[in-house]
Image (cartoon, grey):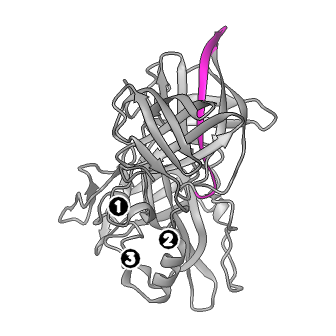
Amino acid sequence: MGEDRAVYFVRHEAGALWWVGLSVDTPLGAGEFHLGLKFANVYRGRLIGSTVLGEWVDTPRGDVPQTGSMDLSLVSTDEMRRLRQTGGFGCSAWRRTDLPARVDAFAEFTEQLGAGSSHGRGLVARAESVVAHGTVVRSLAAEGDDISFTVRLDRPLQDSGTASLTVPDGQSAVNAEQQQTMVCTILGRTRSPRLPGWMQRDGSSVLFLDGRPVNGDASVAPDGSARLRGRELPPGTRVRVCGFLASRPTASGQVDSVVICPVNSIDIVAPVARGSLTGIWASDDGGTYYVRQIGDSVWWLGMSHDQGRTFTNAFSGQITANGTESVIHGESVDVPLGARRDSGPISLHTSDATTLTAEDGNPRRWTKISDRLDQ
């Protein structure tokens, strides 16, 4: 924990110190649903005795676009202090703490369904977290305090890696991966502030448009159509939706439909090829990557779509030209917000600044969603 109340997830790996620093924005503290909405930084330093010499970069998950160098003193294995910095880094002391308790939002959602709340009535929880890519076919529409829209999927749903897309308790299942359209429901105010709704604020709110919280900014027209943060989702809009998967069974126990409810974030896919990699990216591993390019340097914060529980990683690399494309050679390290603990070098290729591919024996692909914080 930093003296700025932010949480820093630190990894000491092969003579280097890495961290992902995420702001804490609500009274729930480090247990809030979305961390790092005001600032989300990445640090990489080299250990020399009890001193760390390093650099830090703010990523586009937060609102702050700063960067600089920073040297640290390792007072003990449980305490670090800042020696010097450039760029305006706000924290100067850190103490090791137990891993903050992250809200089990899926358990709260399941309990809420069991309690028969109005927006959960008739639904059965299916998977902890899913991400859907597709095109809007029905715009935002109010349903009481909730707001729904419909998406035609253009690829299979991805889950968090910890739950299969099947209905529990022996009920028959719809093959959700082949379901062409899916209703997505944004809750209004949830029974628990730790489960996001559009009426709630900051880290407890639903994220919409470049990862910003809705914070109650919604309006409903007389015909029932709705806007979030002044924006519609007209048919034809390309979106990426993260949330929980639920099903609505019939009286006989068969599945009538599969829905994403509650939605916790909506990204409009609208990148602009500006020659910079800075922005928000989606990967075929289901994660969201907040990339920052500064000259020939590239940094990112990567988080799995279950709020980083499966993996959260930091990357630092350098771009070099290679014919008609650019190659980025760097290192990626998982930090202890997530359960995974991988680390190692990675090489990325790009020819248009809107796609990245990795050819390291485990091919992966990243696609740019937006150019947020492009400088």
Q: In the depicted view, which residue is nearer to us: 76 or 279? A: 76
Identify the image quadrant of residue 372: top left
Magenta region, main secondary structure = strand
Viewed as shown, does residue 275 lie left or right of 148?
right
Viewed as shown, does residue 255 lie left or right of 360?
left
Q: Give the crowd class for mark 2: few <14, some 14-19, many >=20 residues within 10 Å.
A: some
- Mark yes or no: residue 353 visible: no
Q: Which residue is mark 3?
A: 192
Residue 158: which numbered mark, if any? none
- Mark yes or no: residue 348 visible: yes
Residue 161 image point, x, y percent: 68, 60
Q: Which residue is mark 2?
A: 105
Q: Is residue 123 magenta?
A: no
Q: Residue at x 59, y 35 (%)?
A: 50
Q: Which residue is mark 1?
A: 205
First in residue order: circle 1 vs circle 3: 3
Give the quarter of the figure containing the C terminus: top left
